[in-house]
Image (tube, rainbow, N blue to C red):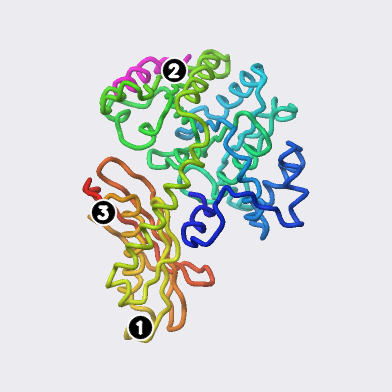
């Protein structure tokens, strides 16, 4: 979710997200360079974002009125599915069609430097120097969902710079890591041969977000059964309306280029059907979800009685905080475990109910890492890990104001289908 959208939702007096914003002097030149498509300016702007520069938010706000032209294609799938090889082949096909292409490749973080491992850049190196291609590898930094915390903002920079297509390749994603659905206009899920039987193919999660399903490494013996399993999985979904997009299953052998042109055709067809700017259209939903989170928190007598305050909200997200008082302390002189649980559980409940559907908690687990004392402020940040038709899973991280972790909490809710009044 866009942090800028959340701030606007939490502070109604703020300017509208797409209103013209004059960049501060420190980034005015960078802003102009990005809009001209200058590669150095694009690279510097992305570095600004990744490093968390103080004026990065101002730069993003200044670029906001220039967004929405690029077609964002998300490439996701399990580790080893052949995503990077597929992106390399897509680059060649898109360049042959005269399109300017930006790539955001999310790599695992190095355990030593926390930077990107850069495996994707190695596999795409042939096109990296092309004048119409810009490739940036970013580290996931432990972020769940298959992306990095800065992916959306980087996509915005490439969009503002005039790239026709922006490809986002996720780090190897499991079935619950579906954050790409909030960023990409067209979501391509890559499935290697050997997925297993039809039960595996029909699991909820990653496969359900696909706009296109691709069987990679189509020269291998298991490609045909995998294609069959995927088609059977699609039959188990609720039948789409007549006007709805029907998810195709395509076989591709990226190393030989087989099936790549057909895949590009179907992505362009989907763009014509669904349009561009999915991540931008989500801003209104983000604002509504944030308002709902604050409303639910304000109407919670237990939260008020314990001093728990809502700090932030959005779709599937919530942050709450409490400053510890003497009545929060246990017989050992540190924060009572029940207070920490209540704080985490409040964030969990708000995040789970942020989308307007009543969610009932059915399971929760908590671990404790650090003690806390009177006067310290604890924050609990909840985010959605996975969401199906009936169940959703959330993780909550509780930390002190100095950033040190205090507790980790995971919870599962049942989605009742009822809506909040």
Query: Pointer 2: what residue?
Result: 250
Q: Which mark is residue 300?
A: none
| Image-based side of 28 in relation to 401, left or right | right
- What residue is drawn where x is 75% and y is 48%? 30
Alpha carbons under labels 3 and 2: distance apart: 41 Å
- Quadrant assignment for the C terminus: bottom left
Picture quarter containing residue 243? top left
Dot 2 lies on which element? strand
Q: Which residues are magenta?
A: 218-233
Is disc 2 surrounded by few (<14), some (14 to 19) or many (20+) residues within 10 Å?
Answer: some
Cβ–Cβ under 8 Å for marks 3 and 2: no
Q: Earlier in the sequence, mark 3 or mark 1?
A: 1
Q: Nearer the viewer, residue 329 or 312?
A: 312
For residue 62, above or below residue 308: above
| Image-based side of 50 in relation to 259, left or right | right
Query: Pointer 1: what residue?
Result: 329
For residue 20, above or below residue 203: below
| Image-based side of 211 in relation to 63, left or right | left
Query: Pointer 3: what residue?
Result: 420
Q: Nearer the viewer, mark 3 or mark 1?
A: 3
For residue 131, above or below residue 361: above
Dot 3 lies on which element? loop
Q: Nearer the viewer, mark 3 or mark 2?
A: 3
Is disc 1 surrounded by few (<14), some (14 to 19) or many (20+) residues within 10 Å?
Answer: some
Image position, residue 414 (x, y; %): 24, 49
Alpha carbons under labels 2 and 1: distance apart: 59 Å
Image position, residue 407 (x, y; %): 40, 66
């Amino acid at each position: 979710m866009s942090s800028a959208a959340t701030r606007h939702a939490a502070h109604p007096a703020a300017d509208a997200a797409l209103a013209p914003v004059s960049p501060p002097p420190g980034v005015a030149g960078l802003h102009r360079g990005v809009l001209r498509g200058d590669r150095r300016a694009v690279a510097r702007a992305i570095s600004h974002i990744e490093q968390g520069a103080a004026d990065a938010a101002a730069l993003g706000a200044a670029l906001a009125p220039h967004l929405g032209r690029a077609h964002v294609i998300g490439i996701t799938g399990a580790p080893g599915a052949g995503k990077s090889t597929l992106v390399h082949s897509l680059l060649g096909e898109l360049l042959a069609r005269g399109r300017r292409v930006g790539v955001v490749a999310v790599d695992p973080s190095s355990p030593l430097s926390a930077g990107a491992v850069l495996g994707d850049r190695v596999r795409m190196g042939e096109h990296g120097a092309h004048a119409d291609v810009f490739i940036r590898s970013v580290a996931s930094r432990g972020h769940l969902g298959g992306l990095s915390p800065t992916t959306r903002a980087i996509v915005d920079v490439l969009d503002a710079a005039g790239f026709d297509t922006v490809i986002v390749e996720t780090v190897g994603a499991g079935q619950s890591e579906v954050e790409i659905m909030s960023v990409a206009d067209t979501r391509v899920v890559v499935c290697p041969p050997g997925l297993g039987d039809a039960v595996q193919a029909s699991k909820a999660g990653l496969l359900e977000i696909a706009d296109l399903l691709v069987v990679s490494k189509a020269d291998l013996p298991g490609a045909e059964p995998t294609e069959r399993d995927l088609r059977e999985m699609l039959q188990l979904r609720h039948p789409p309306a007549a006007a709805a997009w029907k998810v195709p299953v395509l076989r591709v052998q990226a190393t030989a280029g087989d099936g790549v042109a057909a895949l590009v055709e179907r992505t362009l067809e989907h763009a014509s059907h669904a349009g561009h700017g999915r991540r931008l259209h989500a801003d209104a939903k983000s604002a509504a979800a944030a308002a709902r989170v604050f409303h639910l928190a304000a109407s919670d007598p237990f939260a008020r009685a314990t001093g728990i305050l809502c700090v932030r909200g959005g779709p599937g997200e919530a942050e709450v905080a409490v400053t510890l008082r003497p009545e929060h302390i246990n017989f050992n002189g540190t924060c009572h475990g029940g207070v920490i649980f209540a704080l985490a559980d409040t964030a969990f409940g708000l995040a789970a109910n942020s989308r307007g559907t009543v969610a009932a908690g059915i399971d929760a687990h908590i671990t404790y890492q650090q003690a806390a004392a009177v006067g310290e402020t604890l924050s609990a940040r909840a985010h959605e890990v996975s969401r199906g038709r009936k169940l959703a899973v959330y993780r909550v991280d509780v930390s002190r104001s100095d950033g040190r972790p205090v507790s980790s909490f995971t919870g599962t809710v049942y989605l009742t289908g009822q809506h909040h009044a």
